[in-house]
């Protein structure tokens, strides 16, 4: 059993900052990519940022320069530092991991339960 557990969401004023974290646990053999997606009411889930196993990163244009993704490989944990938050960043943020369990031949995709981020004055 693999679990991805997010934390760090909440209510913040426009221009403020939040940091999300997501820890993967269970019978994990190796982790490839880890990242963050978000889904606002009435909209499709969209990619926010991805951290690849080789160390490179990818960001949605809407968050470039404001959000930073980082990762602690030893703890299978990924972080999302969000600065200069805007009301349009309001969404449920989901952690995603691509990983192998000890007995897997291929990588599988796993999702966290989601954490609400609300940007409002």
Image (cartoon, rainbow, N blue to C red):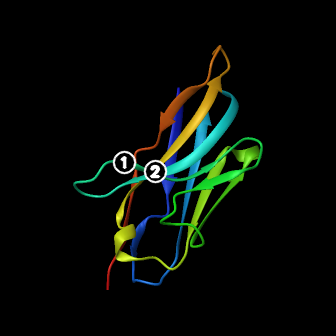
Residue 10 showing in the rendered view: yes
Q: Quadrant of residue 65?
A: bottom right
**Residue at horizontal 63 percent and vertical 52 percent from the top:** 78
Residue that numbered label 1 is attached to: 45
Location of residue 2 in the rendering, given as x and y in whole percent from the top left corner? 54, 31
In the rendered image, which quarter contains the C terminus? bottom left
Q: Residue at x 71, y 46 (%)?
A: 75
The residue nearer to you, when weighing 4 against 50, is 50
Count of all numbered marks drawn on residues in the image: 2
Helix, strand or loop status at disc 1: loop
Horizontal placement of 55 versus 31: left or right? right
Residue 22 appears at what percent x and percent y?
56, 51
Residue 97 at x, y = what percent? Answer: 57, 38
Q: Position of residue 91 (x, y in %)?
A: 35, 61
**Is residue 27 something one can see in this rendering?**
no
Sooner in the amino-acid sequence: mark 2 or mark 1: 2
Few, some or many residues within 10 Å of mark 2 (<14, 14–19, 20+): some
Residue drawn at (49%, 58%) of the image: 7
Vertical order, 50 against 89 (above or below): above
Indicate left or right for 11 with 70 as reference.
left
Task: Describe residue 54's horizontal placement relative to residue 21 as left or right.
Answer: right
Residue placed furthest toward the left: 42
Q: Which mark is residue 37?
A: 2
Q: Is residue 70 above or below residue 98?
A: below
| Circle 1 Cα neighbour tier, 10 Å, few/some/many (<14 / 14–19 / ≥20) | some
Secondary structure of residue under mark 2: strand
Rounded to the nearest angstrom, the CA distance separating label 2 from label 1 is 7 Å
Query: Looking at the image, is 5 positioned above or below residue 99?
Result: below
Cβ–Cβ under 8 Å for marks 2 and 1: yes
Identify which residue, 102 or 48, lies in the foreground.
48
Mark number displayed over residue 22: none
């Amino acid at each position: 059993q693999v679990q991805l557990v997010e934390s760090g969401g909440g209510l913040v004023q426009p221009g403020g900052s939040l940091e999300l974290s997501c820890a993967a646990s269970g019978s994990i053999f190796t982790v490839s990519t880890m990242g963050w997606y978000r889904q606002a009411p009435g909209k499709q889930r969209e990619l926010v940022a991805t951290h690849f196993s080789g160390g490179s990163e990818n960001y949605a244009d809407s968050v470039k320069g404001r959000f930073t993704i980082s990762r602690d490989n030893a703890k299978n944990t990924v972080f999302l530092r969000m600065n200069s938050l805007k009301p349009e960043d309001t969404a449920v943020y989901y952690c995603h991991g691509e990983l192998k369990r000890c007995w897997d031949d291929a990588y599988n995709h796993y999702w966290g339960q989601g954490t609400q981020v609300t940007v409002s004055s």
